[in-house]
């Protein structure tokens, strides 16, 4: 297997592109893909302040690394979710990465800020941890970016993530989600910060290779709450198709962006934003989903405290 560009021994084969690259040319390929995605969708420029959502995994750390290498002004935000040792390890990886490179890392601890971690929250409101986890991360990322004066929030969602999300949205015909699914979501108001996904054309495997080549130490373990998630099932289905027909994931998602999404966008997600009556962040209802969730958790916690103890006979 030889490098497509120089003919030297290749270290990475990309079946979907019918190509292979040596180490220097693979790094060049990866970084060019990121730069093209940024320019194509006008995600941000080098004058913008970018807040990268950093979990401690390969995708978010690789994104932060490549943005800095390309000359963008990027800081990181880590949300400590309190998921046992997994969260401690994740925070440790993010902190070490930032310190070694002299980068700014902002940390928000869920339990310290709101009174309980994601596991306690799920148990209190009696729903799957992933639901409250995802909602909390989206809310905190946007709020911190707005209050700290960042222009854009960037996340490490890759092609596998986006294709799996698209498959789930199509299977359930989630019109509103289909209208919003894009590598970039422009600000819809002063308090709703622009969102961007610069890795959307790169697979999980490709990002892992980039992290390895740059000695990025990331958390390898999967979140203990992940098993059973439908997104993993959709990823597995797409991976099986990809093995037989390389390039399927890319065609599926990119053709959606080029040909289908514009049709959904026309009236598919109409809504009026207002300020949440409790926190002031943007919402379509009187209270935002985040405040409704945490208010429900606080009510149940208060009810449990006032409940009389069981009497043993």
Image: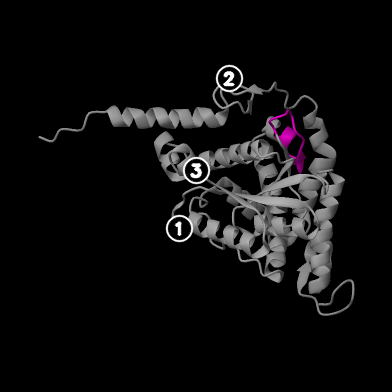
Q: Nearer the viewer, residue 108 or 130?
A: 108
Counting residues from the start of the chain, the first of labels 1 and 2 encountered is 1
Residue shown at the point (85%, 52%) measured from the top left: 36
Q: Residue at x 63, y 41 (%)?
A: 141
**Is 82 placed left or right of 139 in the picture?**
left
Quarter occupied by residue 166: top right
Find numbered disc 3 in the image and state the secondary structure of the residue it sits on.
helix
Residue hosting label 1: 85
Q: Name the residue carrying label 3.
A: 110
- Percent position of residue 167, x then y: 68, 44
Corner quadrant of residue 288: top right
> Looking at the picture, does residue 54 appear above or below residue 196?
below
Q: Is residue 184 magenta?
A: yes
Visible in this render: residue 231?
Answer: yes
**Secondary structure under badge 1?**
helix
Kindly report the secondary structure that dominates the magenta region of the rendered protein.
loop
Q: Position of residue 223 (x, y in %)?
A: 52, 54
């Amino acid at each position: 297997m030889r490098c497509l560009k120089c003919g030297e021994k290749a270290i990475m084969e990309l079946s979907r592109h019918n190509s292979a690259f040596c180490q220097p040319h693979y790094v060049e390929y990866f970084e060019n893909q990121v730069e093209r995605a940024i320019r194509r969708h006008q995600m941000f420029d080098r004058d913008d302040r970018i807040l990268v959502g950093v979990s401690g995994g390969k995708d978010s750390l690789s994104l932060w690394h490549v943005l800095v290498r390309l000359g963008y002004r990027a800081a990181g935000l880590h949300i400590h979710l309190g998921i046992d040792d997994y969260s401690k390890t994740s925070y440790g990886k993010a902190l070490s990465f930032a310190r070694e490179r002299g980068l700014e890392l902002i940390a928000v601890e869920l339990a310290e800020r709101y009174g309980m971690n994601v596991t306690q929250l799920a148990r209190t409101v009696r729903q799957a941890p992933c639901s409250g986890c995802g909602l909390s991360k989206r809310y905190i990322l946007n709020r911190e970016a707005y209050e700290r004066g960042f222009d854009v929030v960037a996340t490490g969602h890759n092609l596998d993530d986006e294709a799996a999300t698209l498959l789930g949205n199509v299977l359930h015909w989630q019109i509103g989600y289909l209208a919003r699914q894009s590598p970039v979501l422009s600000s819809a108001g002063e308090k709703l910060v622009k969102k961007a996904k610069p890795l959307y054309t790169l697979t999980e495997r490709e990002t892992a290779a980039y992290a390895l080549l740059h000695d990025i130490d990331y958390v390898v373990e999967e979140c203990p709450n992940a098993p059973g998630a439908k997104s993993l099932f959709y990823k597995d289905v797409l991976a099986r198709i990809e093995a037989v027909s390389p390039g399927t994931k890319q065609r599926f998602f990119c053709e959606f962006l080029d040909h289908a999404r514009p049709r959904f966008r026309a009236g598919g997600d109409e809504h009026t934003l207002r300020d949440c009556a409790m926190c002031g962040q943007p919402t379509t209802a009187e209270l935002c989903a985040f405040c409704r969730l945490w208010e429900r958790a606080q009510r149940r916690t208060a009810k449990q405290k006032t409940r009389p103890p069981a009497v043993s006979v």
